Amino acid sequence: MATYKEIRGTQIEAVATDPSNPVEGQVWYNTTSNVLKGEAATTAGSWATVNSMNDSRTSLGGAGVQTSALGFGGYGDSQGVTESYNGTNWTEVNDLNNARTYLAGSGVSNTSALAIGGYATTPRAFTESWNGTNWTEVNDLNTARFALTAAGTQTSAIAAGGATPPAARPTNSEIWNGTNWTNTGTINSARDSLASAGADSTSALIFGGTDGTARAYTEVWNGSNWTEVNDLNDARFGLGGAGTATAAIAFGGNSPGNTANTELYNGSNWTEVANLNTARREIAGCGSSTAALGFGGYSTAGSADAEAWNGAGSPQVRTFDDS
């Protein structure tokens, strides 16, 4: 039988702390814990608890990716609070100009985002643009609404769904070109508290939501029209979403009652995968279907919890034993 050195070209290293950036197949002996460890790829995705936000809150907006995210607004100590995530820690930064809850977000990092719509005594049409330091008020939505969803970037986004009390749920969606919102195609099923995924204003996916009943509806946007496609397995609202129109992740929500259920979309079908560690609703999300971040929400109260999703093939440290 070949030895580890013959296979890898080096002996097993003895270290007091695990290496910070191990490569797949690397093996080492931790002299502090007295265990043999190695780096392997995951065969299935999983959620891992990461550092919590500073402010517990629910119904907040989110934007960015797993290692560069922004959380803003929502029910908490202040409805204008904004927090920036660098992949390790959350830091409070400058507040929204217009404090509100049940708002949507789009953007690709913690330095480039939009905060859209929301609720503050009445439905709001506010749009604010984030440059990494400050929020700036820009042109409003055409239809004031809350509990809406949005996808895309700071300069190319789409907003859809939502509510305008006492009973209306607008079906018009709006696209953002970096300056103005323009009314565009209507969604097939009016609902609020839905989630979305998408790269820009020409390609997006919306899913879940409620019209008074939890729904599993999924619709895809091709830049011109919304088309109904295969439903979620678990009907729910107040869920989080991330990814693109052909590779998305849905997590958490109210079905009714808090759920930890997570599903992946491959462009055709939804598949149930590993659950969140903490079931919650009104959760924010960002990232991709293989590297997502879920944060905030409501479990038994407003939550500061954050979790990172690492899809199949992601690296993980494993501890070897005699079994």
Image: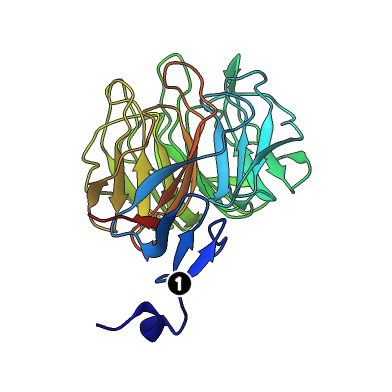
Point out the image quarter for the C terminus.
Answer: bottom left
In front: 83, or 207? 83
Instruction: Name the residue that disc number 1 marks.
Output: 12
Residue at x-position 46% and y-position 65%: 28
Seen in the image, is 53 located left or right of residue 207? Answer: right
User: Horizontal placement of 142 versus 268: left or right?
Assistant: right
Q: Nearer the viewer, residue 155 or 140?
A: 155
Q: Mark 1 falls on what kind of element?
A: loop
Depicted 289 relative to depicted 301: above or below: below
Residue at 62% across, 24% down: 100
Q: Is residue 86 above or below residue 26?
A: above
Which of the 4 image quadrants contains residue 181? Answer: top right
Indicate the quadrant containing the N terminus: top left, top right, bottom left or bottom right.
bottom left
Splitting the image into 4 quarters, where does residue 177 fall? bottom right
Query: Quarter-wise, where is residue 42 in the image?
Result: bottom left
Residue 131 visible somewhere in the drawing: yes
Residue type indicated by callout 1: Ile
Q: What residue is rendered at 30% in x and 20% in y?
A: 257
Along the line of sight, the residue nearer the viewer: 156 or 93: 93
Residue 105 can be seen, yes or no: no
Query: How is the structure coloured here?
Result: rainbow
Neighbours of disc 1 within 10 Å: few (<14), some (14-19), many (20+): some
- Residue drawn at (62%, 28%), measured in percent from left and top? 73
Q: Estimate the x, y position of residue 227 in percent, counting from the top left.
A: 29, 50
